[in-house]
Image: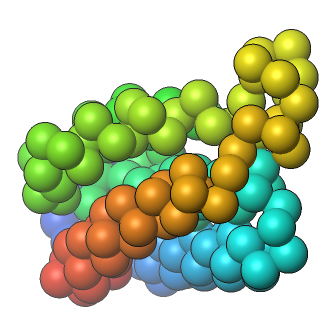
Amino acid sequence: MTRYGKVSDPSKRGPPLRDEVKLWLADSDDSMKVARDNLSLGNYHVVAFYTHQAVEKALKAAIVALEHKAPPKTHRLRLLYSEVAAEVPLTAEQARFLGELTPVARRARYVDVAPGLPSEIYTKEIVDQYMEKALPIIDTIKARIAAEGA
């Protein structure tokens, strides 16, 4: 079976799949570090963007680890979550938050989709809430991946 084909026999999962999961998770951790570093600098639009990226990358790791397939090339967090919703238990509030965080992928970077200059629309209060809500989601995803042994 191909690297991303559905594999029904767990013994046929090779290191490349586990390595890719580790890379996605490491990249998620790195994105959260960039978010934290920029929080202290007051770059709140950067914090918003990298918080979104951290969640996105964790979800993509879950898709690889739990569904054994390539994640969709999208920034839509609820769409990514739909791929693993049966296996990753998020609350209804957390799932709604994914929809709230999704537009950040564009609004934090592009003036043509933001209601103003990205550096002016995100505040410390907003990004504190984003991080407060995102971290438990990432932790839940990581715990589920670890339980899978990926």
Q: Position of residue 46 (x, y in %)?
A: 79, 56
| 92 or 80, nearer to the observer | 92
Q: Determine which quarter of the picture holds residue 106.
A: top right
Say if residue 80 shows up in the picture.
no
Q: Is residue 143 above or below residue 17?
A: below
Q: Is residue 146 above or below residue 99?
A: below
Q: Determine which quarter of the picture holds residue 142.
A: bottom left
| 80 or 91, nearer to the observer | 91
Q: Is residue 81 left or right of residue 45?
A: left
Q: What residue lies at 37% left-to-right and 60% top-to-bottom? A: 133
Q: Is residue 51 left or right of residue 84?
A: right
Say if residue 141 shows up in the picture.
yes
Q: Is residue 116 above or below residue 3?
A: above
Q: Position of residue 83 (x, y in %)?
A: 29, 39
Q: What residue lies at 39% left-to-right and 31% top-to-bottom? A: 99
Looking at this view, name the residue that lies furthest to the top.
Answer: 112
| 40 or 147, nearer to the observer | 40
Q: Is residue 110 left or right of residue 79?
A: right
Q: Is residue 27 above or below residue 48?
A: below
Q: What residue lies at 45% left-to-right and 78% top-to-bottom? A: 18
Q: What residue lies at 31% left-to-right and 71% top-to-bottom? A: 136
* Colour setup of the view: rainbow
Q: Is residue 32 left or right of residue 10?
A: right
Q: Quadrant of the C terminus?
A: bottom left
Q: Position of residue 129 (x, y in %)?
A: 45, 58
In this figure, what is the number of numbered marks? Answer: 0
